[in-house]
Amino acid sequence: MGYTLAQKILAIKSGRKKVLPGEIVYVQPDLILLYDWPGFDGLLRDIRIDPDRIALNIDHFYMADTEVSAQVHRNFREAARKYNIKKFYDIGQTGIGFQLMAEKGHIKPGMLVLHLDPHASTFGAFGAYSIGVAGGVSQALLTGEVWLKVPETVKINVTGSFAKGVTSRDLFERLIGDVGPDGALGQVVQYSGPAVSAMSMESRMVLCNSVQYLAAETAIIEPNERTYEYVKARTSETFEALEGDIDAEYAKVLDYDVSKLEPQVVTPPDVYYVKPIKEVAGIDIDQAFIGTCASGRLEDLKLAAQILKGKKVHPRVRFLITPITPQIYQEAAREGLLNIFWEAGAVIGPPTCGPCYGGVGYLLPGEKCITTGTLNIPGRLGSTEAEIYMGNPATVAASAVKGQITDPREFL
Amino acid sequence: MEDIVKGKIIWKFGDHFNSDLIVGSKYIQERDPEVLRKACLADFDPEFSQKVTPGDVMIAGRNFGYGHPHGQGLTSLRQVGISALIAESFYPVWYRMAISSAFPVLTCPDIAKKADVGDKLEANFKTGDVKNVTTGETIKAEPLSPFLREIMDMGGMAAYIREKISTG
């Protein structure tokens, strides 16, 4: 009996020959990530491990907006200095960490990456085992290790090719809609198959970004040439190419043909209320947003620009677009995408998580927003009586133009 | 922690209860325990924090703590005096947070079907037997693993690590 990629990484990082689902093991993460959030700075008061195993960045508050966030930023800076944490990205060099750390070459196949935030699953796109363990990070910063329960792996075998206006986000949303909010409880979601091998690294990151909403431990994709190319272009450090055994045991295998997949929309009141776009098209919106760790990458911005070129944002709609990192911002500028957004009447903001968690873009009672964000729980963006819909960047752009939730395929 | 937790069920959550709804999304940055105590389930019952008798327990359906694992909800449950939360299953990161802060949680696959608000429970964390004293029925839970029990017994992860570091 063989082992999955996840099992192999956990075996190596726990110093064992093999690990089996259900076992509790201590593992040594290669990299521990943290971003600026009230309370997280407290974890940096006492660090007893090699500082090269830590990477910090500012992204939740792109500039401090209160005394609390200003103090969090200061504490991050002071900890970086005190402990000589070289991988610290402060205001001016930073972007959203769930892209930035890969861009900077810190994420490599076969790594074990630890974060407070389960959106860390994003880095499963690189064949890393990357998990959010909440306060479990404190254990790792002090002792260099953390306990984990070895999960089973569910394999999602993806074939076909995406239609225009349909993205890997729609595949993920469809998966939640199909298996439900505990459809992969405590399991690793491994995306495989020709449609995944053909995906860009950006699309893979989006696909892996929010598997926490399946109650999954994390997501993972076996690396291929495209992965190696991305990583080698960004770091000269070596890494081991790992993949699962052919006879590895999966808890379940699900097959998806994406050729007939339509844009999906997450509707209130929670992230698992997923509907095909035709069931919600026509709902008037007041605000639209493209950004967050689930979007704002170059191909997302290109897709939005395709729809927005020569068009105007609906006069009722406030439309904010935030590229995910300074590098993507620059590339978008170079390709003329930002001009298209400005001419359409969108606001272009700095790379930050703010518009996803309610830092900006407050909604009043009765207002509706469509976003590429990651969470739509009532009150996330202001009033608990506002409604948050989530969709792919094409859907958001098309909806911003028409002033109502719109199938982007009308524009493509 | 004690092997047996006894208490009256003060609240029953449905399936996939989102952790942000315990205190409401507006408090995701809040760190003041007193603010969080008052906010506990206030969106559902503004008087809730005053209705809890310390030692009361809560039950839940599947996947309790779903969503984004903000810790404010957990803090508020502790602050109002909830002594244990027994759910049919837990959202993994919420479960991890509970263990790390030594808040008693037990996975009991039939609890929401076999107990209700007002019932008295006796939950044995060692054997996994959850007795519904009101109905007389015993419901089987998954006993807490000895490893996680050790963390709980030391008072949570912070104390556990201090002990590990000091004993090398």
Image (cartoon, coloured by chain):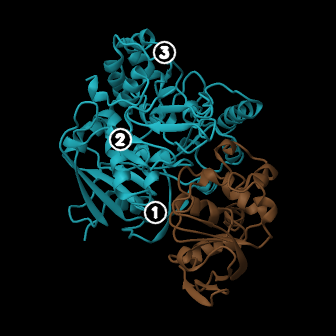
- Type of the residue with mark 3: Pro
Q: Cα distance, mark 1 to mark 3?
A: 57 Å
Instruction: Report the chain shown in brown.
Output: B
The reply, left or right, for residue A165 in relation to residue A132 is left
Front disc: 1 or 3: 3
**Residue depicted at 70% across the width and 76% down the height:** B118
**Residue depicted at 59% across the width and 35% down the height:** A381
Q: Of marks 2 and 1, which one's residue comes earlier in the chain?
A: 1
- Choose top left, top right, bottom left or bottom right for residue B112: bottom right
User: Mark 3 vs mark 2: same chain?
Assistant: yes
- Choose top left, top right, bottom left or bottom right for residue B161: bottom right
Instruction: Report the chain shown in cyan.
Output: A
- Residue carrying label 2: A279
Mark 2 crowd level (few <14, some 14–19, many ≥20, 10 Å Cα): few
Q: Is residue A231 visible?
A: no
Q: In terms of secondary structure, where does tag 3 sit?
A: loop
Q: In terms of secondary structure, where does tag 1 sit?
A: loop
The reply, left or right, for residue A229 in relation to residue A39 is left
Quarter of the image that includes the C terminus of chain A: top left
- Residue carrying label 1: A14
Q: Position of residue A87 (x, y in %)?
A: 55, 34
For disc 1, the chain is A
**Disc assigned to residue A128:** none
- Residue carrying label 3: A315
Quarter of the image that includes the N terminus of chain A: bottom left
Count of picture labels = 3
Q: Position of residue B46 (x, y in %)?
A: 75, 54
- Choose top left, top right, bottom left or bottom right for residue A282: top left
Residue occupying the far bottom of the picture: B136
Is disc 2 in contact with disc 1, using a CB cutoff of under 8 Å?
no
Q: Of marks 3 and 2, which one's residue comes earlier in the chain?
A: 2
The answer to which of A119 and B40 lies nearer the viewer is: B40
